[in-house]
Image: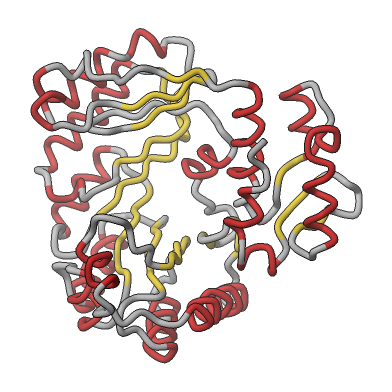
Amino acid sequence: MEALLTEVVGRAKECAEYEVQTIFIGGGTPSVVDTVWIEKLLAAVREHYCMAEDAEISMEVNPGTVDLDKLLHYRNAGVNRLSIGLQSVSDEELKVLGRIHTFSQFLDTYAWTAEAGFDNCNVDIMAALPGQTMESYRETLKKVLSLNPPPKHISAYSLIVEEGTPFAELNEQKKLCLPEEETEREMYWDTHKRLLEAGYEHYEISNYAMPGYACRHNIGYWKRKDYLGFGIGAASLIENRRFSNESNLEKYTEEPLNCRQEAVSLTVKEQMEEFMFLGLRMRSGICVKEFEEEFGESLREIYGFVIDKNIRDGLLHMSEDGAYLALTDRGIDISNYVLAQFLL
């Protein structure tokens, strides 16, 4: 944490012309550290950076690592949005995932958020877990929607079995009982149906929000806004240059201001690709005019063949006024296939 603070303060000069619109403390479990570090971290950003008065300040917390006192400290430090990692209401499924909390502990955590003054909370849930059934997943949806007050934001992800993980090993040995692909898609569209009925907007492939509560920080990623990452392995995008920090703990803590790997300047072609495959994650799709303003070229000139093919296949649709291009419901089911076609 000392190294992280050194980096935050030391990078301020290079960001003098920027206004900080959003902050996201996460990727891991920041709620395990002493609250004094979160207070110091946000105080350092306020002191050394130009920060918008209405900045969205999100923090990830996991049940079993927080109590009411911690949450009060976060609120007083300026955190105004929490993201709580529930994943499932089934203690059995949580155990399979290696989570340290129970559903009962989540309920305690959720109750404390309101007591601490948070009115903007996200709840993370997961589908396609080992041993999960349609019935047990629906139970998770039902109980999350019955929370009082309902969460302003819900992130609903499918489990991805990453290479090199214990799950990948078990899967290769046919010892991981994952739901069928058809069941996973049924879970996805059941989530869509139930959350829309409950008043949520489906604004990104895996994210739902009450009107006015979409995560501004994440929208920044999908719209390729500049962002600066701090900490071990943190990634950044500044003026079409991508770079990452050292991912070795010892090396990072020794030289937090000399830990960046070589920056990669994105070619115009790569910028176009990112504009498309990140922007199409949004349910509203990509804005044709924004593409043309950013690149000085017609979207149809660059991608006409791909767009026409996928519209014919029912995977993309253009708004009636021709202003937005978006994935159809069928396109979302095979989004990786569609998005890969925008690699030039």
Residue 286, compared with residue 64, is above or below; it is above
Q: Position of residue 89 (x, y in %)?
A: 30, 80
Residue drawn 53% across the image and 54% down it: 213
Q: Position of residue 258 (x, y in %)?
A: 22, 13
146, 324: nearer the viewer = 324
User: Residue farthest to the bottom?
Assistant: 135
Which quadrant would the C terminus be assigned to in this image? Answer: top right
Residue drawn 25% across the image and 42% down it: 76
Residue 25, compared with residue 266, is above or below; it is below
Q: How many marks?
A: 0
- Locate residue 328: give its quadrant: bottom right
Q: Is residue 15 left or right of residue 212?
A: left
Q: Is residue 12 left or right of residue 326?
A: left
Color scheme of the displayed model: secondary structure
- Locate residue 64: give its quadrant: bottom left
Q: Position of residue 175 (x, y in %)?
A: 24, 80
Which quadrant would the N terminus be assigned to in this image? Answer: top left
Q: Is residue 196 left or right of residue 122?
A: right
- Locate residue 228: give its quadrant: top left
Residue drawn 51% across the image and 39% down it: 221
